[in-house]
Amino acid sequence: MTNDPLLQPYQLKHLTLRNRIMITSHEPAYPEDGMPKGRYRAYHVERAKAGVALTMTAGSAAVARDSPPVFNNILAWKDEVVGWMKQLTDECHDHGAAVMIQLTHLGRRTRWDKGDWLPVVAPSHEREAAHRAFPKRLEDWDMTRIIGDFADAAERMKAAGVDGIELEAYGHLLEQFWSPLTNDLEAPYGGSLDNRLRFTFDVLRAIRKRCGDEFIVGLRYTGDQDLPGGMTRAEGMEVSQKLKDSGLVDFLNVVKGHIDTDPGLTDLIPIQGMKNAPHLDFAGEIRAATGFPTFHAAKIPDVATARHAIAAGKLDMVGMTRAHMADPHLVRKIVEGREDDIRPCVGANYCLDRIYQGGMAFCLHNAATGREETMPHDIAPAATPRRITIVGAGPAGMEAARVAAARGHAVTVLEAADRPGGQIRLTAQDERRREMISIIAWRMAQCEKHGVDFRFNTYAEADDILATAPDVVIVATGGLPHTEVLSTGNDLVCSAWDILSGDVKPGRNVLIFDDAGDHAGLQAADRISTSGAAVEIVTPDRSFAPEVMAMNLVPYMRALQARDTTFTVTWRLLAVTREGNTLRATLGSDYSDIRRERLVDQVVVNHGTRPLDDLYFALKPHSSNLGEVDYEALTSGAVQQIRRNPQGRFRLFRIGDAVAARNTHAAIHDALRLLKDL
């Protein structure tokens, strides 16, 4: 029997959890029609197969019509949810994992123009900054109705066979009652702490009456809002003790902070460049004070930290949610003694940021997550090994090499630089984003285990490729910055890459024209402003850096706002001319014929990349498919069969930014879905 603290079973009431690792509630936005159908079920089952003890679904499932999800969540107020949740639960149970679901009423954390266009409700008229709706102050009949909605939803989940439920408090309606900032009701539901907690206990009693004392019920809540005028740490400790003493809950799932703004959300759920496990000690204090089953998750990305959390007695169950998005087989690899094979979470937060912009949650460097129905996490060997030559060792080329080698092919990678990484090497030079290099380092280690032949410092020409006698050639050469966007003065500007690489030193008075809206523009601004320079970021968009998205924007803003930085939206850089020792930048607008001018000493352009595709076009006539991709086969998981040139010596494909400027996830997705069937 193992002595690993993480692999010890845990007894929660009548439920035996097979180890101490859980996936906390989160909503990847995979439901269809508000139901956890095939994609949703496959996502959780994959992790159940690999050994996780408890998978917590939904983040959160809505219990009422007037709690419409702001992105694609489970609708627990519909009776039809029972059948879908039962399928998911039964299949996870078949693989030994427990299943719970998180239920909530969002209160003010939603919008009135979602769902059925019903008024948003809360214990005050104070709106939430993040979702902007001004709520109706709850009436007595609203509270009676919502208490019944919680009980109905819990009863549906019990009927579905889930092992328990968790109520979401922080930021949602329950906590809106708790916090003095969001509750200005009179007694009996406002005023004293006991009054502010009354609604929560009414909900819990209604659930117990409907589902019985044996049904497992927990609460996820903040023990300290860390917000002026909000719930304090002392009140959080008191709330924790009251929850335990009530006899109405079976576990506490503790967080710290608030989520009503993007900065608050990012502090509560930290991203790359921020401290790992920042609230773990706080959760441990609550466990020590209450002696009650305590769960917690907040940027616990690695096994060592998770193991410490259990071994030190800080937690009973440790949540590794984003870590399981990066590698759903994390637990299995621990059990098999293969921790060095675990694909690391790099904290890029592509998963969370995407859902807040209306997309599905995808992992930046695991393209199979969320696509389990069509994309493999384990790579199957090919029936016929082939010789595959890959040009480029950025994220696309490295993923192609990893997958091809795992398939059993003989893989050769040609790379012009002296090491792998491509654009990620530039990104990772920023201390705050250095975790990104793990995307490359993990793939390099996997490729080395499979005997991939790397040839660095090799600027490949067509003859070099032909000399490898390939059956398949993958061109993953990426792209180069495109800065020729001006009517005059293209020769007077530099690219964001020039700044990040150090090839061009920052000026003292700098204009950055950011027409791509991605990390490169803001990273360049960060690098330049650190030197003490004045920086103006100009974009033709109505908001700046739209590709960076909300939570990733927070660290940039905290840094840039503290310096001499100006943000100018809805203006486009048209021309640059030299004027003595300065540059005159002419700005125009898409909205009118107005012109403005700036005198600066440096202009930086961030306009994405153009494909570095000369090699691809040189090889194209020699290929049997003439570079053509069968999109139907690609998207359905079928084998590429196109043969346009009978004299062709190999099949040719290009992926990633060698096709068009996109992002790291797109490059890795290209590679996985193409190579998994070659």
Image (cartoon, rainbow, N blue to C red):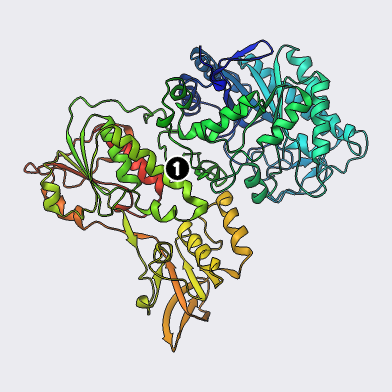
Q: Residues within 10 Å of mark 1 (few under 14, many from 20)?
A: many
Q: Is residue 311 above or below residue 260?
A: above
* Rendered view: 193 above or below 521: above
Three-letter code for the amino acid on which mark 1 is drawn: Leu
Query: Percent from the top left, x then y, of residue 103?
Result: 67, 28
Residue in the foreground of this view, choosing between 314 and 37: 314
Name the residue furthest left: 647
Q: Is residue 300 left or right of residue 669?
A: right
User: Where 274 sits versus 452, above or below?
Assistant: below
| Residue 280 x %, y % | 66, 35
Tell me where residue 15 sits by quadrant: top right
Q: Which residue is mark 1?
A: 364
SS label for mark 1 = loop
Where, by quadrant of the figure, is residue 638 drawn?
A: top left
**Residue 566 location in percent, x, y?**
59, 70
33 displayed left or right of 246? left
Q: What's the residue at 37%, 31% (across, down)?
A: 375
Q: Position of residue 408 (x, y in %)?
A: 23, 29
Q: Is residue 32 visible?
A: no
Determine the image quadrant of residue 294. top right
Residue 461 horizontal side relative to residue 182, left or right: left
